[in-house]
Image (cartoon, rainbow, N blue to C red):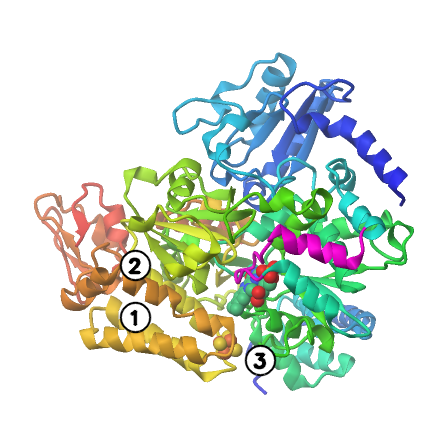
Amino acid sequence: MMKGSNLPFNGTTEQEAQLRQKLNELRSKDGALMPAMQFAQELYGYLPYEVQLIISEELGVSLSDVYGVATFYSQFSLYPKGKYRIGICLGTACYVKGSQDIYDRLQQLLGIKSGECTADRLFSLDATRCVGCCGMSPVMTVNDDVYGRIKPDDVEGILAKYRERG
Amino acid sequence: MDIKQLEQIKDTTFKNVGNRFTHAQLDGMNFDRQVLVCCSTGCSSESSQKIRERLAKLVEEKGLKRVHVGGTGCFGLCAAGPVVVVYPDGTFYSHVKPEDADEIVESHLVNNVEVQRLLYVDADGKTKPINEIESYCKQMRHALRNCGVIDPENIDEYIAREGYFALYKALTQMTRDEVVDVVTESGLRGRGGAGFLTGRKWKFTKDATGDKKYVCCNADEGDPGAFMDRSVLEGDPHCVVEAMAIAAYAVGADQGYVYVRAEYPIAVERLQKAIDQARAYGLLGNNIFGTDFCFDLEIRLGAGAFVCGEETALMTSIEGHRGEPRPRPPFPAQKGLFGKPTLLNNVETYANVAQIVLHGAESYNTIGTERSKGTKVFALGGKINNTGLVEIPMGTSLKEIIYDIGGGIPNGKAFKAAQTGGPSGGCIPASLQDIPIDYESLSAIGSMMGSGGLIVLDEDNCMVDIAKFYLQFTVDESCGKCTPCRIGTRRLYEMLCKVTEGKATLEDLDKMEELCYYIKDNSLCGLGQSAPNPVLSTLKYFREEYLAHVVEHRCPAGVCKSLLKYVIDAEKCKGCTLCARNCPANAISGTVKQPHQIDADKCLKCGICASKCRFGAISKM
Ligand SMILES: Cc1cc2nc3c(=O)[nH]c(=O)nc-3n(C[C@H](O)[C@H](O)[C@H](O)COP(=O)(O)O)c2cc1C
Ligand code: SF4
């Protein structure tokens, strides 16, 4: 089994207790695996090996099935995310309005590709599908903030804002 | 809940919201004015919630007891967002900011003077009430009838719009067969893409034998650039809840699932609220309206896999597995979710059901064309002025959608093509803009209705690049279960890359076409079977553009980077060194006050230099 991230796992015992309790509730439900993993991802921000193992134990689903589901769906991540999660929409409406150029600029400025996280764990970058704000395309998101109708040259300023906050 | 209570809620609530549905001042209303703020994803991301809060606070502070401030779903004109509408005046304010709330309250609500600077300006340069705005005039809001009208988080407002009366009628006055029949006679066809006759699907599921049956709603909406289903769920979630209950009664199910994209947090939240409220009113649960019909509903979240929109994959995913499709037959109507007979319909399909049951098949089948009845919602996106959500009667021409409703192409550019059906669909060239939009016409020209994404492309878009974009999407989203799709789409993508890099030969184009048909004929599910459509349709209608790439090594639209070159005009260059300092690849050389040069081998074609140059000396060729 691939271990995914090489960054150390730093989950707390409280998190683990919370997860196990939720898994207990879910156990009797039909098709509990996905809701369980969605909960875990929300809790830890990603699905490291250690967390997959807990889910597998508690739900009685084989680890390879858990891993199989984790790698099938793009929403699940085996890697930690940055403090600021940047999403750049490459959905059609944004793409035809030049979001690829914005994505290229982000990769250049951050030195990372989609799915990765900067070494200081400040930023992570994800190329996303439609986020549903096609009226403002092209669209970039940073955590819950949405930036619409942006140009490649706006990117540097936006990143600086978050760098300052640290 | 019984019918008396339902009617009472309807009458009481009507007094609160009645003058939203009309532009005349009605008697006996609790409010003289309705101020509605769009709170769907598009406008919310531009702080419409803050606008709503600010308006509500000011209205209270000023003691305006006869003014009601409410939030609604999408008005459709997302390009004008955030939108605030005042009824019964019909005033349509666009691009509103939270700080504008003060002026709206003071000027419009207190002194009865509209805030001129915020009024939406129509295509003819005039400002007008919402019902006269050109974009709305050719539309027919059926599935969206409550979007932008009611507060989606308030079940009473839905009831005030005849909500749950169709469920009452079905449960107490109609047999299961009669419900199936009225849906069949209405001619309603599935809005999820394939256009299967909805009533027939209901009949198959009803006739299937099984101790347990399910009804499901497909709200996965995977087409990148489509947001019809999201808008229905955000603007009118109860219409889906009610329709699913009606469907469950008709086919004999007692449990329903709505499979929603996880990327739609607002839709999920509102749908969950709607389910909770319906449950609290006894409109979900046991013995609904005192009958022996029991039904409950649960939301399941997708996790970002396009293939899960395919019906068998969706069910596999709800069961908690990798969402891989399975071969059909058996069809879901016989053996679906957890191996039981299952009915699956799309959100927009359901959104039409209650009105059909309540007002009869004729209320629906008199709209539209011979074989495509009713209306269709489209999400207009790309190079079009009025990006947003529109609903048109079937048979409306593409031209009407783009020019009359969509307001035409921005910046005076030429309309080149429209893409419908997303990654499964095709491009309609400008020369075919007079075709009527219905299922048959669209498939005849190699596109498809799809779920309703309509992306407009102008002269600056390269059609080969667009085909490559969709192929990249299918390569990413192919689940990998079958070889023609998993490997075939990748090879096809690589061939397209060769074209955009100017390295392909004419023979490659023929091979590409052959591969397209191979993938279509041999893939297991609809994803693979339709993946080559964007390539085939662009090859058919824009062959000369492929030829320009292959033969002349030129991208006519100036999009394909490998065929581009950035050059500095020595006449215009002042030698300010700004470009050289900003080039991330150190590809620009030159001394101060002397014209600079770009080293084409090092150049990444990122365009930073051209955007930095203050003298317009750098251009792409
Ligand atoms: C790859 C693929 C993706 C699909 N995505 C969706 C989708 O996002 N939403 C949808 O309603 N139907 C989608 N469909 C169609 C469904 O399989 C199914 O036909 C539809 O949900 C049935 O509902 P309807 O009869 O009301 O249209 C997709 C089909 C395929 C092959
Ligand atoms: S056609 Fe593609 S998506 Fe469908 S089953 Fe085959 S590999 Fe999976």
> Between B566 and B464, which is closer to the camera in this rendering?
B464
Is residue B187 shown in magenta?
A: yes
Q: Earlier in the sequence, mark 2 or mark 3?
A: 3
Q: Disc 2 residue type?
A: Met
B610 relative position to B81: left or right: left
The answer for which chain carries disc 1 is B
Q: What stretch is highlighted in magenta?
A: B174-196
| Cα gap from disc 1 to disc 2, whole angstroms | 11 Å
Between tags 3 and 1, which lies in front?
A: 3
**Ligand 2 contact, mark 3 (Cβ < 8 Å):** no
> Between B551 and A16, which is closer to the camera in this rendering?
B551
Q: Which residue is drawn at 52% across and 75% down?
A: B525
Quadrant including the N terminus of chain B: top right
Between tags 2 and 3, which lies in front?
A: 3
Residue B318 on image: x %, y %: 68, 70
Tell me the tag on residue B327: 3
Whether residues under marks 1 and 2 lie with C-beta atoms below 8 angstroms apart, the answer is no
Q: Name the residue under label 2.
A: B463
> Between B69 and B571, which is closer to the camera in this rendering?
B69
Whether residues under marks 3 and 1 lie with C-beta atoms below 8 angstroms apart, the answer is no
